[in-house]
Image (cartoon, rainbow, N blue to C red):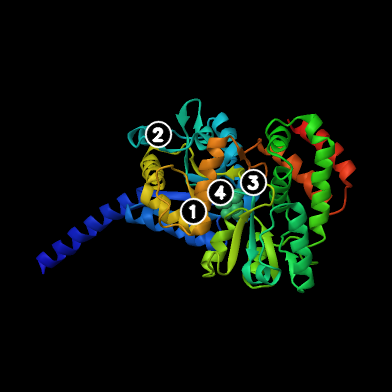
């Protein structure tokens, strides 16, 4: 009996120790991966960390593009209660680093030689003042279209190579009685289309407008043409587009209700989740006129300064994220390309292989640009100013002429 009591007490003690250790190694993760495809990808990360003894406290904030998540984050940090790790895009990472809120990942980055394998385009956002402050998970890009294969075949099967062919295809979808463009009317989704439309009018134009914020380009004739193209695209969305979430727009293409969606390659996560195959059920291609160029965004996990007992879990999480096997497993499901250059494309489907290849080629050719819509071209203030004009114009509140004027003024005020 006594032995039994001792054994029970001893195991209780052991359990106590184990659970204390377990409790200490926990990450609270703020993110906006709430769609079906995104949640499946998140699960890969969660399971990976759990296998390393790190438990996961989930802090999801829905809203594509992360606008809402960033608002919640600000409230948490202001309240003195920063999460351990936060999904973040481009310039937002800098904003927090500038305020001295982020931790330091140099130890793990040096040990694992991140400098050698993470592309410079991503390192620009993962480092501040020479120190690693965030761990990139992936590389997405926004200049994609996702076409329903059956509808495309019915329309003659030819992938549109330029603006006129795109419009001709959308007209054919209309004749078929389906919604030509599956779209959700939310500012970040309108802006995602605008990324591609602006890029389709030239690489130099995109760079000058969104990277350099040149007032003459923002207010010029070509920008007016970009807005005219948005007006044209607006004629192909259905009556219920306003406010629709992006993944519901993807579902319209998946369910043969719409012809195509203009969206970043996270949309592929939805197709994969619905067991649809590229080349058979859907076609992925670059927005017509943007072949050879890529507007990218990279999801990174920024680690906030937390008490010492929590930093170990942050470093384990950062290391797990950069592990090449994890990079493959995660990005195959997420729809993105890996954040390292040395991950084989073997496990990726045709669209994933194309994403990896396009990225490498654009990087080499100097035609890889940060996505305006997804925080890789400008700080949030400028991005939001552009969102506002793009959305008002798309919804018919501004003519193209007025939109270019407002764009110049709004960007100038936000700079
Ligand atoms: C993120 C993606 C995400 C998408 C929609 C983008 O800003 O980079 O990871 O899937 O928003 O929520």
How far apart marks 1 and 2 lie (CA) works out to 22 Å
Q: Kindly identify which numbered label has been placed on residue 140.
A: 4
How far apart marks 1 and 3 lie (CA) works out to 35 Å
* Left or right relative to 329: residue 379: right
Give coordinates of residue 186: x percent, y percent: 73, 55
- Per the image, label 2 sits on a secondary structure element best described as helix
How far apart marks 3 and 4 lie (CA) works out to 22 Å
Give coordinates of residue 172: x percent, y percent: 76, 67
Q: Is mark 4 within 8 Å of ligand 1?
A: yes
Number of the front mark, 2 or 3: 2
2 or 3: tag closer to the N-terminus: 3
1 or 2: tag closer to the N-terminus: 2
Number of the front mark, 3 or 4: 4
The residue tagged 3 is 71
Number of the front mark, 1 or 3: 1
* Label 1 close to label 2 by CB (< 8 Å): no
How far apart marks 4 and 2 lie (CA) works out to 20 Å
* Left or right relative to 191: residue 284: left
Residue displayed at 70% across by 66% down? 259
The residue tagged 1 is 353
* Label 2 close to label 3 by CB (< 8 Å): no
How far apart marks 2 and 3 lie (CA) works out to 34 Å
- Per the image, label 1 sits on a secondary structure element best described as helix
Q: Is residue 295 above or below residue 232?
A: above
Count of numbered labels shown in the rendering? 4
Q: Is residue 45 visible?
A: no
Residue displayed at 67% across by 62% down? 158
């Amino acid at each position: 009996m006594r032995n039994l009591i001792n054994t029970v007490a001893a195991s209780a003690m052991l359990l106590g120790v184990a659970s204390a250790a377990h409790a200490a190694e926990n990450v609270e993760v703020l993110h906006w991966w709430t769609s079906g495809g995104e949640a499946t990808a998140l699960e890969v990360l969660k399971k990976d960390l759990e296998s390393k003894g790190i438990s996961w406290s989930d802090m999801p904030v829905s809203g594509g593009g992360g606008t809402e998540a960033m608002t919640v984050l600000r409230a948490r940090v202001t309240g003195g209660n920063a999460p351990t790790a936060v999904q973040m895009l481009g310039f937002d990472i800098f904003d927090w680093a500038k305020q001295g809120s982020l931790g330091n990942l140099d130890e793990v980055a040096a040990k694992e030689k991140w400098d050698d394998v993470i592309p410079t385009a991503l390192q620009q956002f993962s480092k501040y003042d020479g120190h690693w402050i965030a761990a990139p998970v992936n590389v997405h890009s926004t200049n994609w279209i996702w076409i329903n294969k059956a509808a495309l075949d019915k329309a003659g099967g030819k992938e549109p190579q330029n603006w006129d062919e795109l419009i001709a295809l959308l007209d054919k979808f209309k004749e078929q009685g389906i919604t030509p463009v599956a779209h959700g009317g939310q500012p970040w989704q309108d802006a995602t289309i605008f990324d591609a439309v602006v890029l389709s009018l030239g690489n130099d134009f995109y760079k000058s407008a969104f990277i350099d914020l040149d007032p003459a380009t923002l207010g010029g004739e070509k920008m007016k043409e970009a807005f005219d193209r948005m007006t044209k695209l607006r004629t192909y969305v259905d009556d219920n587009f306003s406010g629709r979430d992006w993944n519901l727009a993807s579902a319209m293409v998946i369910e043969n209700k719409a012809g195509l969606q203009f969206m970043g390659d996270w949309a592929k996560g939805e197709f994969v989740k619905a067991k649809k195959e590229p080349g058979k059920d859907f076609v992925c291609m670059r927005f017509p006129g943007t072949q050879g160029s890529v507007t990218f965004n990279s999801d990174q996990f920024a680690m906030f300064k937390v008490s010492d007992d929590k930093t170990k879990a942050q470093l384990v999480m950062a290391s797990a994220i950069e592990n090449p096997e994890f990079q493959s497993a995660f990005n195959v499901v997420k729809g993105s390309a890996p954040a390292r250059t040395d991950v084989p494309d073997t496990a990726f489907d045709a669209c994933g292989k194309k994403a990896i290849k396009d990225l490498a080629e654009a990087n080499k050719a100097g035609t890889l640009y940060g996505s305006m819509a997804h925080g890789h071209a400008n700080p949030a203030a400028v991005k939001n100013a552009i969102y506002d004009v793009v959305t008002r114009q798309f919804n018919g509140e501004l003519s193209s002429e007025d939109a270019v004027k407002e764009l110049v003024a709004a960007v100038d005020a936000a700079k």
